[in-house]
Amino acid sequence: MMRTWLWLGSAVLVSAGLYLATVAGSVAAFLLTYLTPLPLFLLGLSLGGRLSGLAGAVAAMLVAGAAGPQAALMYLGFCGIPVAVLCELAERRYPGSGGPGTDWYPPGRLCVWLALMPLVLFLLVTLYVSATGGSLEQLIADEIRALMAQYREILGQAGDGTPVADTEQFAFLESLFARIAPGLLASLWMSLTAINGVMAQSLLVRRGSAIRPAPGMGDIELPRRFVVAFAVAVLLGMTLDGPLGFIGVNAAVILAFPLLLSGLGVAHVLAARTGLRVVLLFFLYLVLAVTRWGAVVMIAIGLIDHFAGLKKRLRGQSPSV
């Protein structure tokens, strides 16, 4: 019991401390905030999601005392609650082929939950802004326009001192970022959350402290309803303007993330069949870090895998329709 409370207290202090690292003002301290979910994942994936939720609530109180209630709400929304939900789901077991309670909660459904949380938040914020008579897209556009004006001024000062003119290229970038900014921010959050979760699970498996075995990337199978929802979002984003088109575009960007992970699962299975698994995966993730087109290709592969069963075919299994 004492050991449990020790782990709980450590997770609270470390997670809250990492989140408050931005107060230091340095770039290195800011980067530390990316690891804020890690202590909560370590606690939840080893001792249970409820303890992770308790740790997140206590850490939010510390953040509120140090940085105010708004910072605490952001901590809960972006770290405390999502980590607790994912840990609680990850430890579930359900009836499988070997009898009752023999299969762990599928990694594909964990990926779906990872996308649903920012999607619901985005929809709620959009509805709230609309109810107050405003437009979320317009608010974002105004902020981006101000940031781009500062950027052009900095570019001009680096040259001959004359601010850079507002060209068609800048106008296009402004409208593009305003259109997909919520989806891009959600994708960044999902990436950081997934990386912290994978890191925590890997560390716990090596120590023999994990509740469940580490799921492989090749085990990601997405539900059909999820793929249908993605297709509907893409259709809305491509055919409609205005608020519904804005919602469709960003919903499609958010829902594309699990498809990206599924596509990466295909690559992992394919690489495992060769003798160059580490080398191939290293170059794959390097390409993903350098260019966004690599992500687009992986999303397309993930979509194809859902219908063609690429991962099962590579394993020599019969794909289910």
Image (cartoon, rainbow, N blue to C red):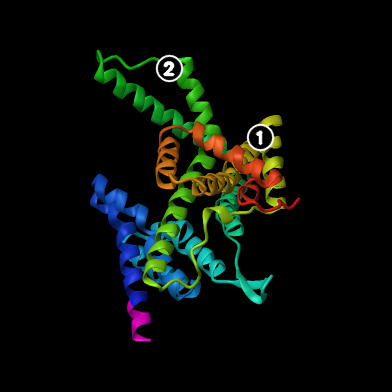
Q: Are marks 1 and 2 in contact (CB under 8 Å)?
A: no
The image shows residue 22 at horizontal and vertical percentages of 29, 51
106 with respect to 160 (left or right)? right
Q: Which residue is mark 2?
A: 166
The region drawn magenta spans: 1-6
The residue type indicated by label 2 comes to Asp
The image shows residue 321 at horizontal and vertical percentages of 76, 50
Instruction: Residue 56: name its quadrant.
Output: bottom left
Q: Nearer the viewer, residue 300 or 276?
A: 276
Q: Nearer the viewer, residue 160 or 255?
A: 255
Q: Nearer the viewer, residue 286 or 186?
A: 286
For label 1, count other residues whose C-alpha is less than 10 Å away and answer few (under 14), some (14-19) or many (20+).
many
For label 2, count other residues whose C-alpha is less than 10 Å away and answer few (under 14), some (14-19) or many (20+).
few
How far apart, in angstroms, are the residues tagged by discs 1 and 2?
27 Å
Q: Residue at x 29, y 24 (%)?
A: 154
Majority SS type along the magenta span: helix
